[in-house]
Amino acid sequence: MRHRSASHNFARHPAHRRAMMRNIVMNLFKHGRIRTTVQKAKAAKPLAEKLITLGKKGTVHDRHTALRELGSTTAAKAAVRVLFGELSQRFASRNGGYTRILHLPRTIRQATVDLPRTKGIKRSKLYGTRLRDNSDLAIFELCEAEIVKPQRKQRKARSKKPKDKPVPAKAEPVAAAPAEQQPVEEKKAE
């Protein structure tokens, strides 16, 4: 009987395991949906749920706690911004269950849904196992709607002023008119 096995080891040292979980959760917050193994998704789910709950509270202390959990990298700071901005509003009325794990079918024949045929998504990403070790894959995603970034106010395009200058017809050059001379009064010397 193996005691003190509260978490998955993934054959990694604790620092490597912690970094892997941080990366999975940060990518989940960034993209809204990631493809990973079932075991990694199950291990990362409690961390993601805990961080979203912190984001819903929204205090400064909770923001520092989230940064401590995710590390103090630039990517972590961006993930915390998303967490306390978009995701906290998105899950405001939901009490838990912010993420879900969808097991991918092993073969295309087992796929019960019609897989998308778009240029942006490779169909092979939506089914199958990983080639090198044949591990089962899953889609780890946030519930509710997709992440929609708020649109920035668009700058008004500078409108070019129409050139309404009339084009003069070819006119003869006007000679400079002599300036009218004003009579100069001469003062008589007394």
Image (cartoon, rainbow, N blue to C red):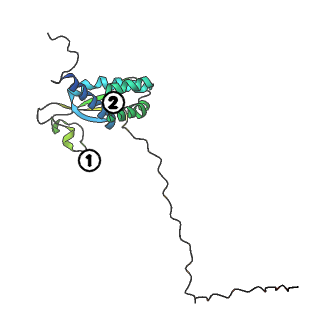
Task: Name the image quarter holding residue 57.
Answer: top left
- Residue at point 38%, 34% (across, down): 82
- Residue at point 47%, 50% (across, down): 154
Quickly name the residue at label 1.
120
Q: In this view, does 138 lie to the left or right of 52?
A: left
Question: In the rendered view, would you say 152 is above or below 81?
Answer: below
Q: How far apart are marks 1 and 2 (CA)?
A: 32 Å
Q: Nearer the viewer, residue 18 or 112?
A: 18
Type of the residue with mark 1:
Gly
Type of the residue with mark 2:
Ser
Question: In the rendered view, would you say 176 is above or below 52?
Answer: below
Q: Is residue 67 left or right of residue 189?
A: left
Q: Quadrant of the N terminus?
A: top left
> Is residue 94 visible in the rendered structure shown here?
no
* Residue 11 % position (x, y): 15, 24
Q: Are marks 1 and 2 in contact (CB under 8 Å)?
A: no
Quickly name the residue at label 2.
72
Q: Which of 91 and 107 is in front in this view?
A: 91
Q: Quadrant of the C terminus?
A: bottom right
* Residue 147 % position (x, y): 37, 38
> Is residue 82 visible in the rendered structure shown here?
yes
Disc 1: CA contacts within 10 A as few (<14), some (14-19) or many (>=20): few
- Residue at point 19%, 34% (across, down): 105
Q: In this view, does 119 lie to the left or right of 61?
A: left
Label 2's element? loop
* Residue 126 % position (x, y): 22, 39
Q: Nearer the viewer, residue 174 or 105?
A: 174
Label 1's element? loop
